[in-house]
Amino acid sequence: MYEIVRREQFSETVFLWEIQAPDVARAAQPGQFVMLRLNEGGERIPLTVADYDRERGTVTCVTQAAGKTTRYMRDHFEEGDVFADFVGPLGLQQHIENVGHVVFVGGGLGVAPVYPQLRAAKQIGNRTTSIMGFRTVGQVFWEDKFAEASDELVICTDDGSYGRPGFVTEALREIVETGEVDLVVAIGPLPMMRACADLTRPYGIKTMVSLNTIMVDGTGMCGSCRVTVAGDVRFACVDGPDFDGHQVDFKELLLRQKRFKRQEEEANRQFDHVCNLDQILFKQGKRTYKKLKDIEPTQVKMPERDPVERARNFLEVNLGYTAEDAYREAERCLQCRNPRCVEGCPVGVDIAGFVRHLLVHDLDGAREAIFATSIFPSICGRVCPQENQCEKHCLLAKSMEPVAIGRLERFVGDHAARMKVEPYRFESRLGKVAVVGSGPGGLAAAADLCRYGADVTVFEALHLLGGVLQYGIPPFRLPREIIDREIKVLKDRGVKFLTDKVVGKTFTLEQLLGEMGFEAAFIAAGAGAPSFLGIPGEFAGQVYSANEFLTRVNLMTGNNFPYADTPISVGKSVVVIGAGNTAMDCLRVAKRLGVPDVRCVYRRSEAEAPARLEELRHAKEEGIEFHFLHSPTAIITDEEGDVIGMKVEKMTLGEPDENGRRTPVPLGEYVTIECDTVIYALGTKANPIVAQSAPDLALNRKGYIVADDDTQATNLPGIFAGGDIVTGGATVILAMGAGRRAAKAIATWLVNGKTTWPPTAEEIDAYVAPQPLSAAEASQLGAEDLPAAG
């Protein structure tokens, strides 16, 4: 990263950066240039070196805010800020010799790169005349510097508001006609340099021009800066940037410079729009900036892999929004004054806030708005059922498709710059807390507890971290690198993770809160025990639970057998019982394992299917066959016990049940579906391992841990629980919400000295999280004496 050590604004459009770059400053010579890039995804901007200070290790560049990037440089970077790349010096230096009388012509921004050549020419004894050209008096800069290095100085303004009225070429003509001139150096816009060269050609005065503005890469690699000089193709970045203007084919250059005019105009239009939104939404603090009639009625479509291609591999199906897609979708947000979408988010993400940052193309700001309540935007944006949560509450949903909040959240999580993450440091620890399970609930709790100043250890029974994210969701929906990346943030924050530790077997809860020294524990072990129907034949070898089937593939890479050690056998015809998201995962995994016939059997209609509509659509596109209103009554096996079919009864829908879903009613008609493999995807039951080791822990009649809805506190002091082990199988985001509630309740209980159980809602509301120490504060107190949060 490179720091801006000085910034100066010369006019509305022209500004100066002095950049700390010792290596570049040490090597820089008059006439050379540098390439600057602001951040990941930014373009490379060629800037001629306007000055350098070898002792201070700085390089000075003067820039005109003309395009999208240079305007962003002007508006968003201040003294002390840093940017990504600064490459140079590049190009050939201008060889300064004592030739007699040298006239330097600088037009607008071209004044800056003229200066080091002017100064060098004066220092070795040349007579120097300088002509500085600007549109108006408000754009004049460096007059004093030029006056000091010039025997004669002429300042021209196009509008006559200062100095000599008119163009620099007229001033140059007078000097050429009235005096002996040995060399002209002209730097500025291409038309100006061309005019200067045309003017001096009849007099035979050598005229050097600089072509740095036509460069892209700057290292001689791309060839974009090719120019015809004296009939030969030359490259400005390695053969220049300075050339004899009489030999440059300016006509060719001017034509080539129009290549990206349309794109640049569109970029500038977009930049103006973003600047206007920034002014309205941030500087003026206004909301509801757009009327409903101006909103696109449908969501921007999510790019997807072709169904035929994706059904053969485990690559991610949804490809994610491009930047253009994301910004266009963000434009659909009305920025409501009272955004109801937040009501539908179990972790309370500031949805309007992060979308507001997206509207002004501020990905880092959007990331920070999300990170205030959730550090897993890339995960939640992929697997949360937004259509039944935040998007369901979107104001647009009354008359059109809601804002695609989940897709935007994913875009931010995937594309915002990765922050340098270090452990939080506090003046004192909150306490030592154990988290049982590294699924979404446990991870969310660990994230907040770490932020509150706790020393957090997460215990995971499996060999990989992520819980259901890892074993339950296939990589074509949630790539494994995404899980690893999100968990790494917690590791970098100081959270400890211990795998292969089964709480209830390796350690008991009593041991955790006793001899192991933990002051509180949050149980987020999930509900991993499978459910079956109890029908004949379900104990056949080729009958899987969804948990076993998905674990063999997702966790143990059975799809790579025999290259991986875990086998998976699916035959030629698979039937999956159930129509939830897990059922869709099983169906689609089976198809990817090469099974020709994959079918879904569900006792209700498609309208009652609990799976997300997108998952149902994807499954159909990939060739899955659906048998709705069919209920399994028996699995048929042959004499050797192998599955050969399933007997199902046709159903119709009766009255709604207590949950509002219409109850399936048998019709007494039976059919047989031929198959050789059956997978049960009927939900899960509470895993009893933790509870068995703590006989005093209160459970409900189904074996789930009883915990308070608001605090996640159990009946045992210091023990909190949340997620599927409390609610039964639910969603990732609901488990995360429980984890966040538990973390705040744990922090409250520890801060209050563990005096009363359980912590009350009033106590939790009154809790104020401590602010981590800044790097400077930590340094003052002595880093070695400061306990890290984890």
Image (tube, grey):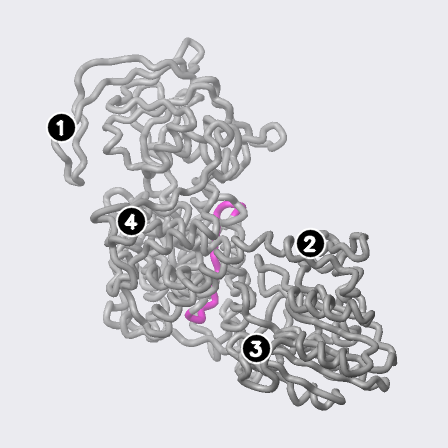
In which quadrant will I find the N terminus?
A: bottom right
What residue is shown with label 1? 654
The correct choice, above or below, for 205 with respect to 258 in the image is below
User: Could one spot residue 566 in this view of the protein?
Assistant: yes
What residue is shown with label 4? 402
Give the side of residue 405 with respect to residue 563, left or right: left
Is 462 one of the magenta-colored residues? Answer: yes
Q: Quadrant of residue 628?
A: top left
Mark 3 and mark 4 residues within 8 Å of each other at the beta carbon: no
Marks 1, 4: nearer the viewer: 4
Disc nearer the start of the sequence (3/2): 3
Give the side of residue 200 with respect to residue 616, left or right: right
What residue is shown with label 2? 252
| Secondary-structure class at tag 4 | loop
How far apart in space, not on screen, are marks 4 and 2 (Cα)?
50 Å
Closer to us: 602 or 545 = 602
What residue is shown with label 3? 158
Disc nearer the start of the sequence (1/4): 4
Check disc 1: other Cα within 10 Å, few if <14, some if 14-19, many if 20+: few
Position of residue 366 measured from the top left corner of the image (x, y, whole percent): 42, 62
Q: Give amino acid for label 4.
A: Pro
Q: Give amino acid for label 3.
A: Asp
The correct choice, above or below, for 238 with respect to 127 in the image is above
Give the side of residue 542 with respect to residue 745, left or right: right
Q: Give amino acid for label 2.
A: Glu
Disc nearer the start of the sequence (2/1): 2
Is 656 one of the magenta-colored residues? Answer: no
Mark 3 and mark 2 residues within 8 Å of each other at the beta carbon: no
Residue most extreme to the top: 639
Marks 3, 1: nearer the viewer: 3
Marks 3, 4: nearer the viewer: 3
